[in-house]
Amino acid sequence: MERRTDGYKKIIYSGQARCELFRKRTQKTLLRGRQLSHLEQLGSKRSIAIKPDADGYLGRECPNAECEGYFKVRTGTGNSQNRTCYCPYCGKRGDPNDFATKDQLEYAKSVVMREVKEALFKDLRKMERHTSGGFINFSVKVEGGPPIPLHHYREKALETQVICEACKLDYMVYGVFVYCPDCGEKNTFQALQANHEVILEILDLAAQNEKATVRTQLIEDALENCVSGFDAYGRKTLGLAGKRVISFQNLLGARKTLRDQHAFDVADGVEPDTWDFVVRCFQKRHLFSHSMGVIDDEYMKKANDPAAVIGRKVSIDADEVRQLIPVLQQFAKNLQKLP
């Protein structure tokens, strides 16, 4: 595939043994060296235009046999001069030509085979003869037959749209945490920020709702999303760093593990009172998820909550969730420095 300033939009169909062998054998055996002008005009390389989908995205596929992940890039965005492509899933790096999808290659092959057949037919038409005289009438007529059908396909629907903050490439992937196909930048922190933006919108919706029960449920859901989003971020960051993946839903345990195994403090630069606040929020989320918010012995031991009473429901308000978000972003930035 040839990379141009308007995106990944052409396949260079080169070295296709079937087409080239077909052409050479035809020259040697059918016409005994006679030049086939139309076939010669095709040449040994063809540039086949690949159209993006209705939204302007072009499908790509990782050439790594253990991955073969499918993604899409919007043509005309990102670094148009870039000569390297990255798989957003496994990080495989290579020439953009290597990331054509199987469907695109099949389409290009069908276009070339159709052109070869049409060129061959035109050249063979030159052999048509009609001879009469004496006792023998002789004629040669070439019939073209139906054209070779083209391979049609549709680009696949994907889950997540990402616009890289570093190079501004607009691309779509499965999942959330990925590499940018143009610059290779990891989008983990960007994805966490996007998650937090949605959470803030949920809190705004909660404030507008007239029913107290609905407001409470929306705030609890926002807290759940905060904790699960940070857990996903932490797991992915450790995995990309080649570290053993641990759960960050148990924040106390995660901090201890990182200290013991890597001499690293995820809460570096955070005041003790702020740390206690974050732990309390995580423990509240645990109650909402596992005991419908009813306070138990574990919460009493870990949350350092002077207002808590065993057997009663814990409460959470929107301001607590809003205060939690910037602290989690600080933890996330700390994790990026993990040695």
Image (cartoon, rainbow, N blue to C red):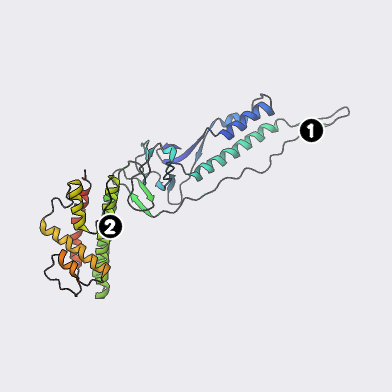
Q: How far across and how far down the image is residue 129, in percent?
A: 76, 30
**First along the sequence among labels 1 and 2:** 1
List the single residue furthest toward the right.
Answer: 135
Q: Is residue 29 visible?
A: yes
Depth check, front residue: 162 or 249:
249
Q: Secondary structure at mark 1?
A: strand
Dot 1, crowdedness within 10 Å: few (<14), some or many (≥20)? few
The Cα–Cα distance between marks 1 and 2, rounded to whole angstroms, is 78 Å
Q: Locate residue 329, reporting x and y percent.
A: 21, 53
Tell me, yes or no, if residue 326 can be seen here. Answer: no
Q: Is residue 249 above or below residue 335?
A: below
Secondary structure under tag 2 reads helix
Q: Which residue is mark 1?
A: 139
- Disc 2: which residue: 229
Q: Amino acid at mark 2?
A: Gly
Please state which amino acid type lies under the numbered disc 1. Answer: Ser
Q: Position of residue 92 (x, y in %)?
A: 37, 41
